Image (cartoon, rainbow, N blue to C red):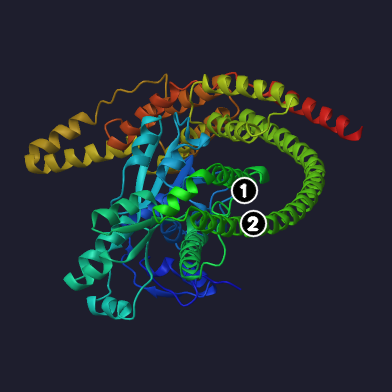
Amino acid sequence: MNRPLAQRRFLVTRPESQSERLAALLREAGAEPLLAPMIAIGESADPAGLDAALRRLDDFDLAVFVSPTALDQVGTRIKHWPTELAAAVIGPASRERAHELGILDVICPDGRYDSEGLLEHPSLARMDGKRVVLFRGNGGRELLADTLVARGATVEIVEAYRRLPPTMAREELSALLADGCDGVIVTSSEAVHNLFALADEALAAKLHASLFFASHPAIADAARRAGVGRVITTAAGDAGIVASLTECFAVNDSHIAATAAPVTAASPAEAGWGRPRMERRRPLRVLRAVLWLALGVGIGGAALHTFYRYRGYDPQGELVTRLARLETRQQLFSNDEARDDARLRELDNRQIAVDQRLDEIRAQQADLQALYGAVAGDHEETLLADAELTLSLASQQLQLTGNVGAALAALYRLDERLSGHDKPRLMPLRRALASDIEALKRMPWIDYIGISARLDTLAGGIDALPLAIDAKAREEREEARSGERNGLLGELGRALGALVEIRRMDQPDAVLLAPEQALYLREHIKLRLLNARLALLQRDESSFRRDLAAADQELRRRFDLKAKPVIATLKTLGELRAVQPAQALPSLSDSLNAARDARRKASREDSK
């Protein structure tokens, strides 16, 4: 079995944690990988910030990972990935790693595996109002973040790891290359820079003369700027790199073999393959005509024979010599014609074998098309069932929680799945889906979850708010201290003031509150706030406002209005009272009915 990479040595500059699979594939192909990591991976400079972002994953609509390393760092810090949170990655290796971490919804480009390819994905075309967290290393391009912000998203950049200079010494690198190297594999521009920064003059000269394999055109440009003369851009991914190496050295080996082999047969073009037989026999006819013409000229010139003999010239001998030469050439042409006939018969036999193989392939293609038709029908029915379930769940969630953003994200993902199918019966479903998407986009954004959380926070802080009676006791203590400073005169003034006290009898005094009543008062306000949260989730605007007004009134009557916590609580209540939770949300019934109709039509056609 031909193995073009057998006994070849390749320098792998990937980080140590990312080179295992590529090295294993090279060994399977018979090559020897020389591991020289030109980038070291370190922990994030702000691990607390990374942990804080991972605790807030539910606050985001999309997570973007720029490399498998970012996924590895996140995977070591988180146990369960949120089910509803989609992730966007650059290439197939990152997609596989994301699936290993339990991420179900993964967005990945199809052909171009870089930031530009990811930004061309339809899911990232409309980002209005989306909250995105971007996990990456230190530094790097700002293309992803800037483009998503320009498309309307709010992007939070989180440093998941740091790229550090290599720990390998120059002597170790020289020792690896001492026995020769067939190629240098580079998968990042930073690795190219670190490689030449580590090399001395002699090692740099050896690297400049080496063949470089770059996994991206930008990396290839970085190698050329470093002075490398021969750079080949490979396919993406570990398997793509090995396949490109195999193809490159297979071509080189075949070229060398063809150059070194003795020339025993002409090529098809040189031998005249593909030309009509009549065209190849035309020189023979011309040659015969020339011979007859020469004979005629010889007979017609017999009168000159005496003259030529007199002058010492033998035209008959010259003619015989020339005729012999022409006969020799004719024999050569005849041999060539016989050789061409043999080659034509061989080509005819090959053509017959190719035609038979084509017939077999056409038969297999027909079988595969029939099988695909059966599978495609099942796939379409599954797609419609999934669409019906998605719309039903989105409608229920919309009516129960009012989460317009989640429902809109579900409709966007469903529309993306349907966009790859051009069946006519799916068109009504796509039109209804587009109509419901536009209706949801026109809805005012109300953060029910955030408002509910603020109400919970207010209810939890009621126990810490100071009462008015606490303020009264504090004032009395201050008056007592001032009376001690005034001496007998102050004591006399307090005694006279205690003789007369004015109170309103039409409403209870906030100061006259027993300790157990203070406990009931705080619990009463908490219940009011919790009732307001329940009314918010039920879209009961009147009950929501009534409970907030009652809580506001109790706070103003019974609590210290000069204390900062009380002032902040009253301000928050005022902001919440401005919210209008009652709004008519769409039911998504048109899209749901369209999905059911399409599914019934598909079932009827399959049953026929």
Q: Nearer the viewer, residue 410 or 147?
A: 147
Quadrant in the picture for the N terminus = bottom right
Residue 129 position in % (x across, y down): 44, 30
How many labels sit on residues?
2
- 51 sits left or right of 75 in the view: left
Q: Which residue has dot 2 on it?
A: 334
Q: Nearer the viewer, residue 310 or 34?
A: 310
Q: Please tell me which residue is depicted at 35% across the width and 57% down the height of the picture.
A: 231
Residue 364 position in % (x across, y down): 79, 50
| Circle 1: residue type | Leu
Q: Please tell me which residue is depicted at 7% across the width and 39% down the height of the picture.
A: 486
Residue 465 position in % (x across, y down): 36, 39
Q: Please tell me which residue is depicted at 33% across the width and 63% down the height of the picture.
A: 43
Secondary structure beneath dot 1 equals: helix
Q: Is residue 551 above or below residue 234?
A: above
- 274 sits left or right of 474 in the view: right
Outermost residue toward the right in this view: 608
Secondary structure beneath dot 2 equals: helix
- 376 sits left or right of 193 in the view: right
| Circle 2: residue type | Ser
Q: Nearer the viewer, residue 474 or 550?
A: 550
Residue 546 visible:
no
Dot 2 or dot 1: first in sequence order is 1
Q: Nearer the viewer, residue 390 or 449?
A: 390
Near mark 1 (Cα within 10 A), the count class, few <14, some 14-19 or many ≥20, is: some
Residues marked 2 and 1 touching at CB (< 8 Å): yes
Q: Is residue 353 above or below residue 301?
A: below
Q: Is residue 459 above or below residue 82?
A: above
Q: Is residue 594 above or below residue 488?
A: above
Q: Which residue has dot 1 on it?
A: 284
